[in-house]
Image: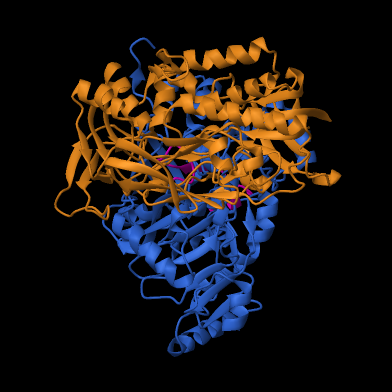
Chain colours: A orange, B blue
Amino acid sequence: MKKVKILVVGGGPAGLAAAAAARDAGVKSEEILIVERDGELGGILNQCIHNGFGLHTFKEELTGPEYAERYVEKVRAAEIPYLLQTIVVDICAGGESGDGRVKYVTVMNKSEGLFTVAAEAVILAMGCRERSRGALNIPGYRPAGIYSAGTAQRYVNIEGRMPGKEVVILGSGDIGLIMARRMTLEGARVKLVAELMPYSGGLKRNIVQCLDDFGIPLKLSHTVVDIDGKERVKGVTVAQVDENRRPVPGTEEYISCDTLLLSCGLIPENELSTGLGVELNPVTSGPVVNESLETNVEGVFACGNVLHVHDLVDYVSEEAESAGRNAAEYVLRKGAGKDGGREQAIVIKASGGVRYTVPSVLRPEHMQEEQVVRFRVGDVYKDAVLAVYFDGTPVMRVNKRVMAPGEMEQVKWKKKKLEEYPDLKEICITVEDK
Amino acid sequence: MYDVIIIGAGVSGCAVARELSRYEMDVAVLERASDVCEGTSKANSGIVHAGYDAEPGTRKAFLNIRGSKKMEELSRELDFPYKRNGSLVLCFSESDRGKLLELLEKGRKNGVENLRILERDELAELEPNISEQAVAALYAPTGGIVCPFGITIALAENACVNGVEFRLNTEVRKVEKTEGGYRLETSQGVFESRAVVNAAGVYADVFHNMVSGRKISITPRKGEYCLLDKTVGDYVNSTVFQLPTEYGKGVLVTPTVHGNLLLGPTAEDITDKEGVNTTGKGIGDLLERAGLSVKKVPAGKVITSFAGLRAHEAGDDFVIGEAEDAEGFFDVAGIESPGLTCAPAVGEYVAEMVRKRIPAPEKKDFAAKREGIPSVALADRKERQALVEKNPAYANVICRCELVTEGEILDAIHRPLGATTLDGIKRRTRAGMGRCQSGFCAPKTVEILARELGRDMGEICKAGGESRFLTGYSKEG
C-alpha cells in the first residue's frame, strides 16, 4: 500500500496552498500527495476568468487562472506529487490496523483503478457546491434553462458555449453577479437580478462593477415564485417578499426569459468528512475545528470552502497555508503531546450577530504567535463595533463602518495577550453598537 | 402491417410489450417523447402496494396482489432495484380505528399476507420518528419500494431485445378503424396494425374515444412530491401512509429504493394534461401533511420537488380490456395507483387478451433475463476493481454526488434503447439525481452524450423537444 505523510483532498486553491505550506514547513515533497478530481489543478478558479483575485496576497489584480497558476507553480517547483482525474471514494481512520492515527484514503482513477493510500494526516480541501433549484423549493415546471451560476460559468468560460440569451438571475451571490456581467459581455441580455434578502449576498465591489456599470437592475427582497416553460424556460414570475421572506400577493411580475441562473448560496461539500466521522457545524456546514484547523478526528485538517464559504480566495490561501503548516507540525512530531495531557481548551463563542467562528476551539499550547478568527455576521451593520470578551472582560473593540453577510470578517490577537488570562475558558465575539 | 401497436412507453405499455415479446408477433411501441418512461411512470411514489386498499373481488385487487407477488421475481429477472421494506397505514385517533380494521379485513380478503395491527408502543419501536399522534397502524410486511424508471426501462429494453420495435418521438394523432385492424396517423407517418393497445396514460381517453362510442374521461390528477437527501433516507424504514381520504391514500413518507426520503403526493384535479408544474401551495401542503406522520419533517434536506399526473378515470377504476364496440382495440387506461404495482400483472393480463384475438406461438429464443447497468456506487471493493479492470471508464467519476462513472454513462448510451438525453442518462444511471442536482456533472454528461452520439453539444437536450441546454457560442468560443 502506498504511504504518505500528508494527503490533501482537492487541488484547488486551498489544497495547493496547504500542500505547498506543508512542504515549506519541513515535510518532504514526496511524502505529500494531492488528489484532484478534475483534469487539472486550480479548482474552480480555472473558470473564474475575471480579475480581482490576489489583491491582498500579491498586491496585484489577477484573474482566477493566473492566481491558481502561482500556487500550481509552487507545487510543481517543489515537485509535490499530485493525481488528476482521481476521486476520493472513502476515507477511514484506523481501519483494520486499529491505529486511529493512520487514515486510509481509497481513491479511483482511470489509469490506476481503485487503490488505497495510507496517510498520517489528511487535509480536507474539497470546496463547496451551489444550492440547487430543488433545495430552494422554487415552484414551477422543470425545463432546460435553469442553471446554477457556476455551471453557467463553466459553459461560457470553459466550453465557450452560451447557456442562454435572455437571463434572470436569482440571488446576488458573487458568482451570480460575476455571471450577470459575463453573460452581458457575451451578448446575452440580463433582465434582472432578484435577491430574497433585503441586502446583497455578494461583495459591494461586484454590485458596482457587474450590475451598476451595465445598468442591470437588482431587486432586493424579491424572489422567483414560478418557472414557466415545459421544454425550455419561457419566463419566470418574480414577486416581492415580506419581512418573513414570504411572497407578497399582488406583487407578481412575469418576466420572459430563456434562462434562470441561481446564485443562492454555497454549501461546503462534506460528504467525505462525515463518512470519516468529522463533526460539522450546522451554521457553516463545515467541520468544527480548533486553532490548528484540525477537526475532531485527530490528524484531519480542513481549509478553504469546505471549512466555511469564503468571500476572497486570498483568505482561502492564508487559511490553507495555516492548515498545511499545522498538518506538517502534526506529522513531524508524530502528534506527540497532542493526545497526551490535553489541557482545558478555550471555547470561542459567536454571539449577537456573529453567526459562527472558525476556529471555535482554541488550545493555548498549540496556538501560533498570532491567532486569526474568521466569521460572518448575520445582517447588515453600519457604524458598529466588533467586540471581543475574554471570560466577560472586554479586551478588544474594533470600529466597523459597515459589515454585511456577504463579506467575511476577522479578528486576531497575539499569543501574549492570551497569556495574561491563564484560566481563560471562553472567548466571546459579538457585534455591538458604537 | 404490425400485429400489435402499443401507444405509450410508460410502465404499462412496456409491461405489455415485454409480455407480447414472448410470442411470434410484430409489435411496435409508439411513444411521443424522446425516451421511454417520460410520463406518469417517471413521477410517482415508486411504491409496491401490498394490496389492502382494493375492494375484494375486483380486478384491481387481483392485479394488485398478483403484481406485488410477481415484483420480486421480475426485479431479479430484469435487474431493477426493488426492496420489500414493509408499509404502515397510520391511524391518528381512536375513532378512526374502525377504518383501520376495515383495511385489515379487506387486505385479508384480498390475500395480503402477514397483515397486522401495531399498537403505539410497537409502532414507536419499529419507527422511532413516527408522529406522537399516531395511535395505531396497519402493518403490511409485504409492501415494497421499486425504482419506477428502473422497472420501466428494464421492461422496455427486454422487449426491445426480444424484437419489439420502439418508435420514439412518434406522436399518435389519429386512430381509425380499418378493414383488418387500425390505422394510426403519427408525427412520423402512418402505421397500421391488427390490434392496438392503448396505454397512453392521461391521453388514453383521447385515443379510446376516437374508436369507441362508449366514451371514457380521464382527468389528470396532479401529485406533487419532495425528494430529500440520502442523509435522511433512513428517517423511516417502512413506507408510511395515512388512512385514506376521498382523494386517495393521502401523503406518504417513504424511503426510496435508492435511499432518499420521499414525501408526497398531493392530489389536485387539473385540466392541463401537461401540467406537471409544482406549486408553492402544493409543496407547502405536502410538507405540512407529511408532518402528521413523522415527528419533524427534515424539510431543510429537500433536494428537489416534482409533480406527476395520475390518469384518473371518471369511473374510478382501471379500464382494461377490449373496447366493446372496437374489436382489437385494447385499453390499458385509468391506470392510477396502484398502477406501478400492477404493471407486471397488467402485462400478462393484457397480453393474454391480445393473444386470444391474435393467436401466435411462443418464441423459441425469448430472452427472459436482462442485465442492468452495473452501479459503481453500490458495488463493493472487489466488484469495483473487476469493473475497472474490464473498462477503466468505471473509475472515472462523472457524478460525484451519486458516484456515477463514465463507464455507466457509456453503458446507458450504448445499450438497447439507450439514452439520448440528459434525463435519459439520469434515470438510467442516477447521474444528476443527487444533492447538487447535476450542477457539476451536467456539462460533463452533455459532453459525453455529444461525443458518443456524434452530435454537437448544442444539440443535446434535457428531455427531447426544445429542451436544449445551450443556445449558442460565446463571442470568442
Residue situated furthest front in the rendering: A420
Quadrant in the picture for residue A14:
top right
Quadrant in the picture for residue B260:
bottom right
Residue A313 position in % (x across, y down) = 47, 25
Look at 31% across and 63% down and name the residue there: B268
Look at 65% across and 38% down and name the residue there: A366
> Vertical placement of B223 versus B18: above or below?
below
> Vertical placement of A168 versus A423: above or below?
above
- Viewer-closest of B392 and A35: A35
Residue B362 in sight here? no
Residue B347 in sight here? yes
Q: How many marks?
A: 0
> Vertical placement of A263 versus A43: above or below?
below
Residue B283 position in % (x across, y down) = 35, 58
Look at 43% across and 75% down and name the residue there: B244
Q: Quadrant of the N terminus of chain A?
A: top right
Look at 59% across and 71% down and name the residue there: B127
- Viewer-closest of A31 and A270: A31
> Is B22 contained in the magenta span?
yes
Residue situated furthest left in the rendering: A250
- Viewer-closest of B204 and B371: B371
Judge left or right: residue A432 versus residue A356.
left
Residue A51 position in % (x across, y down) = 38, 16
* Magenta region, main secondary structure: loop
Residue A112 position in % (x across, y down) = 75, 24
- Viewer-closest of A70 and B154: A70
> Is A222 contained in the magenta span?
no
What is the magenta range?
A: B16-38
Q: Quadrant of the C terminus of chain A?
A: top left
